[in-house]
Amino acid sequence: MPIICPRHLDVLRQMKSAADIPHKDNVLCTRPCGAQMNCNSAGHLCQLPCHAPQLGSASARRNLHDKKFCKYKVKGSHGDCIAETPHEYEHDCCETDKFQ
């Protein structure tokens, strides 16, 4: 039985038995997910293995694309910092709120 990844339509997997159907961690295929992260920063794409959308109620599921999971490195600068001179820094995108 063939299964096509709903996110990467050119990925076809042949299932020989029910044990072959993806279920562990909802991994659908071996490619990176590639969905836009919810941090609203262009180019910040999910790098987890391709996974199924989270199902269930909003309170019961983890949105793996939420901005709190975005680990892209971003640069900023402090002008109002304790330091005497403005300086640049780098941090994970998910920590941006801590630096504003």
Image (cartoon, grey):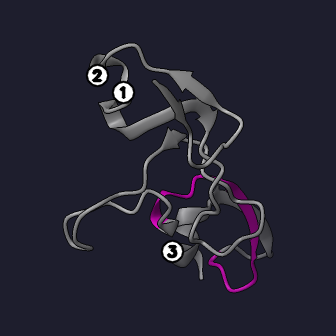
Please report the residue visible at 60 percent of the width from the left and 51 percent of the height from the top: 46
Q: In the image shown, does 25 or 84 lie closer to the viewer?
A: 25
**Residue holding disc 2:** 18
Q: Which residue lies furthest to the top in this view?
A: 16
Quadrant hosting residue 26: top left
**Residue holding disc 3:** 98
Q: Position of residue 23 (x, y in %)?
A: 31, 33
In the image, residue 50 sits, relative to residue 53, either above or below, namely: above
Q: What segment is highlighted magenta in the picture?
A: 68-82
Q: Residue furthest front?
A: 1
Please report the residue visible at 61 percent of the width from the left and 43 percent of the height from the top: 47
Q: Are marks 2 and 1 in contact (CB under 8 Å)?
A: yes
Query: How many labels were placed on the picture?
Result: 3
Residue 70 highlighted magenta (yes or no): yes
Q: How far apart are marks 2 and 3 (CA)?
A: 46 Å
Q: In the image shown, does 22 or 34 lie closer to the viewer?
A: 22
Secondary element at image label 2: helix
In the image, residue 44 sits, relative to residue 21, either above or below, namely: below
Q: Are marks 3 and 1 in contact (CB under 8 Å)?
A: no
The C terminus lies in quadrant: bottom right
Quadrant hosting residue 60: bottom left
Q: Distance between the residues labelled 2 and 1?
A: 6 Å
